[in-house]
Amino acid sequence: MENVRITVNGDVATEVSVCTILRQAVRPIMLLGGDKTGDERWYEVNVPRADALYDEHVRTLEQEGLV
């Protein structure tokens, strides 16, 4: 899983993180994102959420016979 940090409007105080998965020969998937400004637990809370979303996505692809 990759984490992309985005500074909003040049404001260093506002930092948005986006959890993504990059799969071979497939477009990247944005799993979730949010403003982590002042949130010490952002990764602790959201990485497991992103993992669960990815697992759900893979199950859906399997059910549709796409993987």
Image: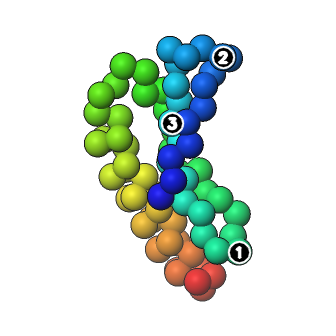
Q: Horizontally, is 58 left or right of 45 in the view?
A: right
> In the rendered image, which residue does mark 1 sit on?
25
Spatial separation of the CA atoms under disc 2 and disc 1: 33 Å
Spatial separation of the CA atoms under disc 1 and disc 3: 24 Å
**Which residue is drawn at the image coordinates 52% and 80% (left, top)?**
63
Q: Which mark is residue 17?
A: 3
Residue 57: percent from the left, percent from the top? Answer: 51, 65
Q: Is residue 9 above or below residue 6?
A: above
Q: Is residue 19 above or below residue 60?
A: above
Q: Is residue 36 above or below residue 18?
A: above
Q: Nearer the viewer, mark 2 or mark 3?
A: 2
The image quarter in which residue 27 lies: bottom right
Q: Horizontally, is 16 left or right of 50 in the view?
A: right
> In the rendered image, which residue does mark 2 sit on?
10
Residue 50: percent from the left, percent from the top? Answer: 43, 52
Please tell me how crowded label 3 is: few (under 14), some (14-19), or many (20+) other residues with Cα within 10 Å.
some
If you read the primary sequence from the N terminus, does the residue marked by circle 1 or circle 3 appear first? Answer: 3
If you read the primary sequence from the N terminus, does the residue marked by circle 2 or circle 1 appear first? Answer: 2
**Which residue is drawn at the image coordinates 63% and 82% (left, top)?**
66
Asked which secondary structure carries label 1, the reply is loop
**Which residue is drawn at the image coordinates 30% and 28% (left, top)?**
40
Q: Is residue 35 above or below residue 56?
A: above
* Callout count: 3
In terms of depth relative to the viewer, which is nearer, 61 or 40? 40
Residue 64: percent from the left, percent from the top? Answer: 59, 80
